[in-house]
Image: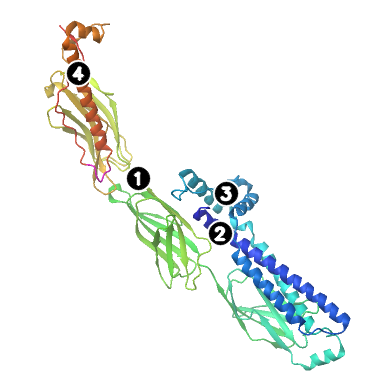
């Protein structure tokens, strides 16, 4: 099962192949019927008599065969793998990328492609803009086949006409024709063609044939062209063509001092995007001025921005809309008398790719839908880096702890600082700085004097960095760093070099005392782990459900973590 979005990119190639098949098969059918008609004309002239109803039989058989060919072609389903192989042959620089994308199949359970499959498909689709896959069956090739089809049809019409009068060269036949009034039938008459396509005009005469005929084309006052019409063999049909029709025009045929009435040719176009201009209104907290981007199909802005899109079209349309890959539809505002469409105040909340669909008053749609990419960049949380001290510390009650760090935010900070908590007391928040510029790294230093806190041995002090910025919802958002601990050791603690912990336990705390010390150590470690786990869980909750970040209030003092010798 080919991806729908990739299929939509290959569908124009399949349409051209379907058109090529229909034209070539009809040309073969009409050419074979014309050949058979000329053979029957030869037989009739050789026999000197005509067979009644032969022209009707040949015409009916050709019509039935043409209808069957048309019906079979309409039911023909393209083989996208074969189409991909053909495109790969035309563009070897793809290196089998397109064929790989076509062969991807979605997951049987979810019906969706995985990330790698989607990347391959998106990469293949992006190559279409560079290589123009639709030209695998070129416009020149289709035009050449149209001429072959036309000549086969003209030959068939001539053969059928010859079957009506097997011996027009006789004296009696010539006299009868001379007595008839000269009549002319012009094809296609009044018609409508797509801008840029060719126009083929045929003039069929009944009665005496003129020596020459001319096609006169008028595209405006004083702007006319004369094109000689060509007659082949004994065919009573004069033909000529205009290579490209770009504007409305009228034409008539002049022959033997006479002329036909004026025929009108109107030109139509499929709706098409000419230009797209974007205007981005950034959230107020970013401090970024309104930005206008001319002629773009890709817009990148921070989430929460508002997008205005102004589209210039080649003609007025009745409906215009953007369709996402998940089939989400965004209607655009259109003006019935202006070739324009617009999108106002669209919120960029998530990244998405859209295709533009246009429909004009006649129900025609744009042949090649334009693609738009809207990228919503995340408002990143502040980044906090603690350079010193590194990790948990073991300090004395009278030490001074020097804190050094760095704070950064993509759109600037409102404030930042240090927070610490002593067991049994309320958290203390210290502001070390305020407003910073966007993408500015702000360093800070702070000296915490533990002596001023009146700490006791074996107490526990926790600390972390914090910063406030403005989140995507426009409200102040607080971010905190990892939490670290300071264990307060006795001031007079002395360690004997080379003496193991077990030896100290046996020396100073013999018997049951050693077991109680280990249990106290485990309890202290468990308390730290629970505190850190609770803290990390609180920090990583979604902003919509996260309570305000505050420092945890420690309630238990830290039991002695080491056995020491005090002198």
Q: Mark 4 packing: few (<14 Cα in 10 Å), some, or many (20+)? A: some
Q: CA distance from mark 2 to mark 3?
A: 14 Å
Foreground label between 4 and 1: 4
Residue at mark 3: 98
The structure's colour scheme is rainbow
Q: Residue furthest bottom?
A: 179
Q: Residue at x 19, y 5 (%)?
A: 507
Residue 443 versus residue 295 in the image, above or below: above
* Quadrant of the image occupied by residue 250: bottom right
Q: Calculate the distance from the C-alpha at mark 4 to the C-alpha at mark 3.
A: 66 Å
Q: Main secondary structure of the magenta part?
A: loop
Query: Which image quarter: residue 163?
Result: bottom right
Please tell me how crowded label 2 is: few (under 14), some (14-19), or many (20+) other residues with Cα within 10 Å. Answer: some
Q: Earlier in the sequence, mark 4 or mark 3?
A: 3
Residue 4 point in image, percent of width and height: 50, 55
The label on residue 11 is 2
Q: Marks 1 and 3, Cα distance to the nearest angstrom? A: 32 Å
What are the residue bounds of the magenta stretch? 542-546
Side of 120 where 147 appears, left or right? right
Among the two numbered marks 4 and 1 on one chain, the one whose residue lies closer to the N terminus: 1
Tags 1 and 2 touching, CB below 8 Å: no
Q: Name which residue lies at 54% across and 53% down.
A: 129
Residue at label 1? 378
What residue would you read off at disc 4? 519
Secondary structure of residue under mark 1: loop
As measured in the structure, the alpha-carbon distance from the residue carrying label 4 to the one carrying label 1 is 47 Å
Q: Nearer the viewer, residue 152 or 434?
A: 152
Query: Could you say which disc has been placed on residue 490 in the image?
Result: none
Dot 4 and dot 1 residues touching (CB under 8 Å) = no
The answer to whether 373 is drawn above or below residue 169 in the figure is: above
Give the answer, above or below, for where 159 lies relative to 365. below
Element carrying mark 2: helix
């Amino acid at each position: 099962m080919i991806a729908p979005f990739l299929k939509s990119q290959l569908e124009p190639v399949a349409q051209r192949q379907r058109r090529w098949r229909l034209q070539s098969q009809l040309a073969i059918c009409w050419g074979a019927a014309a050949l058979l008609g000329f053979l029957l004309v030869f037989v009739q002239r050789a026999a000197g008599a005509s067979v009644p109803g032969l022209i009707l039989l040949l015409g009916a058989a050709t019509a039935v065969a043409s209808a069957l060919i048309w019906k079979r072609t309409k039911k023909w389903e393209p083989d996208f793998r074969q189409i991909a192989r053909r495109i790969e042959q035309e563009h070897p620089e793809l290196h089998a990328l397109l064929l790989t994308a076509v062969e991807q199949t979605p997951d049987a359970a979810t019906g969706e492609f995985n990330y790698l499959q989607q990347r391959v498909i998106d990469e293949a689709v992006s190559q279409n803009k560079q290589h123009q896959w639709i030209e695998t069956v070129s416009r020149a090739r289709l035009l050449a086949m149209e001429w072959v089809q036309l000549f086969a049809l003209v030959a068939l019409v001539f053969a059928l006409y010859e079957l009506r009068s097997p011996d027009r060269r006789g004296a009696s036949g010539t006299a009868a024709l001379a007595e008839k009034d000269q009549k002319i039938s012009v094809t296609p008459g009044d018609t409508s063609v797509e801008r840029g396509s060719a126009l083929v005009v045929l003039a069929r005469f009944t009665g005496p044939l003129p020596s020459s005929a001319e096609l006169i084309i008028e595209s405006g006052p004083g702007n006319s062209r004369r094109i000689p019409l060509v007659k082949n063999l004994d065919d009573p049909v004069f033909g000529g063509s205009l290579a490209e029709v770009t504007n409305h025009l009228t034409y008539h045929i002049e022959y033997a001092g006479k002329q036909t009435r004026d025929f009108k040719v109107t030109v139509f176009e499929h709706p098409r995007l000419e230009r797209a201009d974007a205007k981005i209104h950034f959230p107020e907290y970013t401090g970024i001025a309104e930005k206008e981007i001319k002629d773009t199909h890709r817009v990148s802005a921070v989430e929460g921005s508002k997008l205005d899109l102004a589209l210039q079209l080649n003609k007025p349309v009745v409906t215009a809309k953007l369709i996402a890959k998940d089939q989400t539809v965004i209607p655009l505002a259109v003006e019935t008398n202006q070739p324009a469409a617009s999108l106002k105040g669209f919120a960029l909340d998530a990244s998405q790719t859209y295709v533009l669909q246009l429909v004009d008053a006649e129900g025609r749609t744009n042949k090649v839908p334009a693609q738009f990419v809207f990228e919503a960049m995340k408002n990143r949380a502040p980044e906090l880096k603690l350079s010193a001290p590194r990790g948990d510390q073991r300090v004395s009650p009278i030490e001074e702890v020097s804190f050094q760090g760095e704070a950064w935010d993509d759109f600037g900070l409102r404030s930042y600082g240090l927070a610490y908590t002593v067991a049994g007391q309320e958290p203390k928040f210290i502001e070390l700085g305020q407003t910073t510029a966007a993408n500015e790294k702000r360093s800070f230093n702070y000296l915490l004097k533990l002596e001023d806190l009146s700490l006791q041995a074996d107490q526990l002090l926790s600390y972390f960095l914090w910063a406030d910025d403005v989140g995507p919802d426009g409200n102040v958002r607080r971010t905190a760093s990892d939490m670290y601990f300071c264990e307060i050791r006795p001031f007079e603690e002395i360690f004997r070099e080379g003496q193991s912990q077990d030896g100290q336990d046996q020396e100073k705390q013999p018997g049951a005392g050693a077991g109680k010390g280990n249990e106290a150590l485990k309890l202290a470690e468990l308390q730290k782990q629970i505190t850190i786990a609770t803290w990390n869980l609180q920090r990583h909750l979604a902003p919509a459900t996260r309570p305000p970040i505050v420092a945890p209030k420690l309630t238990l003092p830290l039991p002695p973590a080491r056995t020491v010798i005090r002198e």
